[in-house]
């Protein structure tokens, strides 16, 4: 018989527009494999919220494979070693996969290619990261020229249809039991609210896609309104590869401002991945070295402020609403993400890496490229970033973007505060005793941040 082909799955948990799967099907019996690998990423192993999503996405993928006569094999351990052992067991010599660009996955691909015929395909981004370069052949550091160049190559190729059937091996290798991996929290079940918000898996992504036409026309304005929540919520589906960006791009119709703005968000995702490909340590190292000298607050008082921020107990309603939404649902509105990040970095003068790590653990869409680039944008430390001296005023932002109903939903202590008072109950003298006073004044935090920046500005 023809030797089986291993399909190595990571953040590409779909059957449609899956180049690695389509090619493997043409070559022989396919063994789809997912390896739960906490060894290769080390400190970048998936956080708790991502593990919740992964459990349900793998379950959905296995069901979709079984409809086509196949199944998903689960293994745990260091990816290259596990796949080498599996290949020897089943007599496979070739592995197909979608190429990944996080530094740990690039290392794993290089290691596996030393012993097996590893064939990497593209498909998780609009264009292969590294293929869009400046006139000098270097990676773009700034988003705007990167975006313009990407648009020259759009629209993307047509998405590949899912195979109707998948050839199977004569004998299946043993598989771990998904439930034994302990991906779902139990004591306590802090993710109990997630299932009401999300449907992980390719079918859930397709459902989001069917709603896109209703969202996209007003997207340019509605995406900034937390109470409306006019965002698409595609981010976790894209992160886990349950839908390809090419599929979403092709589904956008018309030339109105909404689709244009939405497309720019897809391009930003490509931009972020290009940055971490060119600068693998971007998640822990400042894009501009001068910020290495910035004196971040540390010690007991700073850690108490960090804890208050994490718990949504800062006394700033828009900040607290965002942090509580994050804990309850594994997600946060995009405008609010910028506000809470700016507050931690500027008002509290706490290192952006503390926030990045918290998001890594609590977001269902925690993505190394997006998370690193977005936090460094907010901090002003990034290659393309908001200036450090531009400090968001959370109370003003809250009122400007009409976040009243959003606050009332996620901060029940303020549910009965009416009108514009809900944005700043302290100022209007209507703060309930059950809700904390602001942990720092806006002007005090702003002045402290600017003073710290002034000492390194030179």
Image (cartoon, grey):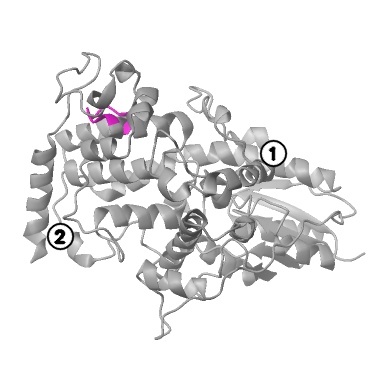
Query: Which span is picked out in magenta?
Result: 310-317
Q: Position of residue 312 (x, y in %)?
A: 30, 29
Magenta-span inclusion, residue 315 = yes
- Residue holding disc 2: 293
Q: Is residue 125 left or right of residue 332?
A: right
Q: Position of residue 121 (x, y in %)?
A: 65, 68
Q: At 44% across and 65% down in the image, what residue appears?
A: 271
Residue 59, numbered circle: 1
Report the residue that reaches farthest toward the right.
1
Residue 22, numbered circle: none
Task: Tell me which label, 2 or 1, sits earlier in the chain.
Answer: 1
Q: Nearer the viewer, residue 413 or 345?
A: 413
Q: Main secondary structure of the magenta part?
A: loop
Q: Nearer the viewer, residue 409 or 343?
A: 409
Quarter occupied by the N terminus: bottom right
Magenta-span inclusion, residue 257 = no
Quadrant in which residue 10 is drawn: bottom right
Q: Position of residue 309 (x, y in %)?
A: 27, 34
Q: At 38% across and 44% down in the image, what residue appears?
A: 224
| Residue at mark 2 to residue at mark 1: CA–CA distance | 47 Å
Q: At 43% across and 41% down in the image, what residue appears?
A: 361
Q: Is residue 326 left or right of residue 316?
A: right
Q: Is residue 93 left or right of residue 12?
A: right
Q: Is residue 112 left or right of residue 425?
A: right
């Amino acid at each position: 018989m023809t030797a089986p082909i291993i399909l190595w799955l990571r953040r590409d948990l779909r059957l449609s527009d899956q180049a690695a799967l389509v090619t493997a099907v043409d070559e022989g019996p396919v063994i789809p494999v997912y390896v739960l690998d906490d060894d290769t990423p080390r400190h970048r192993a998936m956080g708790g919220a991502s593990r919740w999503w992964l459990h349900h996405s793998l379950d959905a993928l296995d069901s979709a494979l079984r409809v086509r006569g196949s199944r998903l094999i689960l293994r745990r351990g260091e990816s290259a070693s596990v796949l080498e052992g599996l290949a020897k067991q089943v007599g496979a010599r070739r592995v197909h996969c979608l190429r990944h660009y996080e530094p740990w996955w690039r290392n794993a691909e290089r290691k596996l290619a030393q012993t097996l015929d590893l064939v990497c395909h593209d498909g998780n981004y609009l264009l292969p990261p590294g293929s869009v370069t400046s006139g000098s052949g270097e990676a773009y550091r700034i988003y705007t020229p990167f975006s313009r160049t990407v648009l020259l190559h759009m629209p993307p190729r047509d998405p590949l249809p899912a195979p109707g059937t998948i050839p199977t091996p004569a004998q299946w290798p043993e598989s771990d039991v998904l439930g034994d991996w302990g991906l779902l929290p139990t004591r306590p079940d802090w993710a109990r609210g997630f299932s009401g918000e999300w449907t992980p898996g390719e079918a859930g992504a397709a459902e989001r896609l069917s709603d896109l036409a209703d969202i996209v026309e007003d997207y340019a304005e509605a995406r900034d309104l937390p109470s409306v929540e006019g965002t698409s919520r595609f981010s976790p589906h894209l992160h886990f590869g349950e839908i390809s960006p090419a599929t979403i791009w092709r589904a956008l119709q018309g030339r109105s401002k909404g689709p244009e703005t939405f497309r720019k968000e897809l391009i930003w995702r490509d931009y972020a991945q290009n940055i971490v490909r060119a600068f693998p340590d971007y998640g822990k190292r400042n894009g501009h070295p001068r910020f290495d000298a910035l004196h971040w607050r540390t010690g007991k008082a700073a850690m108490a402020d960090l804890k208050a921020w994490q718990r949504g107990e800062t006394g700033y309603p828009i900040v607290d609403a965002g942090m509580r939404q994050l804990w309850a649902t594994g997600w946060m509105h995009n405008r609010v993400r910028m506000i809470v990040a700016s507050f931690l970095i500027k008002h509290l003068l706490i290192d952006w890496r503390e926030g990045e790590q918290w998001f890594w653990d609590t977001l269902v869409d925690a993505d190394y490229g997006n998370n690193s680039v977005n936090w460094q944008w907010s901090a002003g430390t990034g290659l393309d970033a908001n200036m450090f001296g531009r400090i968001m005023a959370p109370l003003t932002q809250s009122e400007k973007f009409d976040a009243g109903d959003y606050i009332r939903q996620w901060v029940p202590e303020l549910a009965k505060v009416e009108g514009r008072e809900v944005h700043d109950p302290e100022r209007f003298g209507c703060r309930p005793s059950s809700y904390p006073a602001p942990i720092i004044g806006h002007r005090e935090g702003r002045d402290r941040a600017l003073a710290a920046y002034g000492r390194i500005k030179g």
